């Protein structure tokens, strides 16, 4: 029997219309997955990964242990060099997932006496890692540079930061090191911060800037290197977290930074130390996906074209107020209320479109939304039909 307290929490979720359930495969038109470039089904990537495994005699089902024991196959070192070179970084360290990378970094790098200042909409994996840290953490308003500067100024003046910390503490602090944390593309809104301005602020206040590029890699940059490189900010960023389960269509993540940071993480990031490594076939697929990006792929241009098509359709149907402004593959239309946004999602499904509702508490109550993910393989007609259908529904409700 499930304990009463746990049953009570489940019942609360049911009452709030926020109970999560596992989805099932469907044949609907995909506007839900993070497979922005269609790499998860790319036969060239699959074949090249198979060639790598055969070449290196690594046709194995598992890693056999953590990378510090028996799981550090030579393909890891080779792939990390490829990743570092592609992203113009001194070094790279592969983790099993983006969640593991963020947990490992934020729980081990910021120390007692340090301060973390993070965007209030940073991903749950970042926030969970921060919770595990001994540093004090404070959030600034989403993409609000004035609020960020205000927090930094109060820190410099050694005065009490306004309100509570993100985890219920309120105290006077004199930090040894300050970390500013943001994402280059935010996963629920699809928007982006002014990274150049944040980098400038970080340098002005002698902070260490950390950027999560999960939803930018593969989409932004000359070859998909991410937004940091597109803006030429590699040297201004202390660490970048990149993941392979979005546009690269495979699995895993990496932290980009100095060789000293890599050595530190190998020794102190518990989510790296105490877990079985990715199997060789997963690492080979990562390498093959980078090979596809490096050689140029028409998928990136198709995705860019589809982003422009959706933006044009939103403007043509006068839906700018309802959509959150975005230049990325993620476009969200706010429909307040869990019950309401779930109802719209189900109605859109009857038209053949798979668009997922994002409920509170995943997003702030009153900011529930449909999250539309664009892909290289979506057609112009599909995008137009989706936007027109959403516009018709919203007009009926107004």
Image: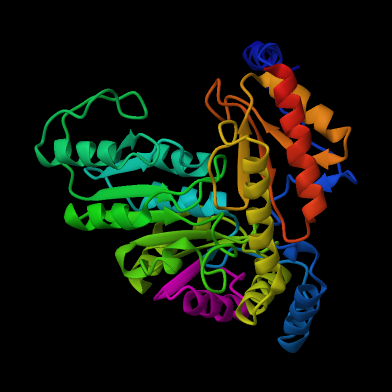
Q: Is residue 21 left or right of residue 321?
A: right
What residue is rendered at 69% in x and 11% in y? 15
Vertical relation: 188 (above or below) 379: above
Q: Nearer the viewer, residue 270 or 289?
A: 289
> Magenta stretch containing residue 88, yes or no?
yes
Vertical relation: 133 (above or below) 268: above
Q: Nearer the viewer, residue 75 or 369?
A: 369
What residue is rendered at 54% in x and 79% in y? 82
Residue extending furthest toward the left:
157
Give, as a single range, the part of the protein colored magenta.
69-93
Q: Name the image quarter holding residue 248.
A: bottom right
Image x and y of residue 105, in percent: 42, 53
> Magenta stretch containing residue 119, yes or no?
no
Using the rendered image of the protein, determine whether residue 156 is visible from the camera's viewpoint. yes
Which corner quadrant holds the N terminus? top right
What residue is rendered at 31% in x and 48% in y? 180
């Amino acid at each position: 029997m499930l304990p009463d307290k746990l049953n009570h929490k489940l019942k609360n979720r049911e009452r709030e219309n926020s109970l999560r359930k596992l989805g099932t495969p469907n044949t609907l038109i995909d506007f839900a997955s993070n497979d922005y470039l269609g790499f998860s089904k790319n036969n060239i990537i699959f074949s090249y990964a198979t060639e790598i495994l055969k070449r290196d005699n690594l046709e194995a089902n598992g890693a056999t242990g953590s990378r510090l024991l028996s799981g550090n196959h030579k393909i890891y070192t080779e792939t990390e060099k490829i990743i570092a070179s592609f992203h113009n970084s001194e070094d790279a360290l592969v983790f099993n997932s983006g969640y593991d990378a963020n947990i490992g970094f934020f729980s081990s790098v910021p120390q007692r006496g340090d301060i973390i200042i993070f965007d209030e909409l940073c991903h749950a994996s970042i926030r969970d890692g921060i919770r595990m840290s001994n540093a004090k953490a404070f959030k600034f308003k989403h993409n609000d540079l004035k609020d960020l500067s205000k927090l930094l100024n109060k820190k410099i003046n050694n005065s009490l930061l306004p309100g509570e910390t993100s985890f219920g503490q309120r105290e006077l602090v004199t930090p040894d090191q300050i970390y500013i944390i943001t994402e280059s593309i935010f996963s629920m809104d699809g928007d982006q911060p002014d990274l150049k301005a944040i980098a400038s602020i970080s340098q002005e206040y002698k902070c260490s800037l950390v950027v999560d590029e999960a939803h930018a890699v593969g989409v932004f940059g000359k070859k998909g290197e991410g937004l940091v490189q597109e803006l030429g900010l590699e040297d201004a960023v202390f660490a970048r977290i990149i993941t392979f389960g979005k546009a690269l269509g495979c699995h895993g993540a990496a932290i980009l930074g100095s060789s000293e940071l890599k050595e530190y993480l190998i020794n102190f990031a518990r989510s790296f130390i105490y877990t079985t490594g990715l199997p060789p076939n997963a690492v080979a697929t990562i390498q093959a996906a980078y090979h596809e990006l490096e050689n140029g792929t028409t998928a990136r241009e198709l995705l860019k074209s589809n982003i422009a098509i959706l933006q044009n359709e939103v403007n043509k149907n006068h839906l700018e107020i309802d959509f959150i402004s975005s230049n990325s593959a993620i476009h969200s239309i706010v429909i307040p209320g869990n019950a309401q946004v779930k109802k719209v999602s189900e109605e859109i499904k009857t038209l053949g479109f798979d668009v997922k509702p994002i409920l509170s508490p995943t997003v702030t109550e009153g900011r529930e939304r449909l999250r539309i993910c664009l892909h290289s393989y979506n057609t112009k007609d599909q995008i137009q039909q989706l936007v027109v259908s959403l516009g018709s529904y919203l007009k009926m409700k107004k």
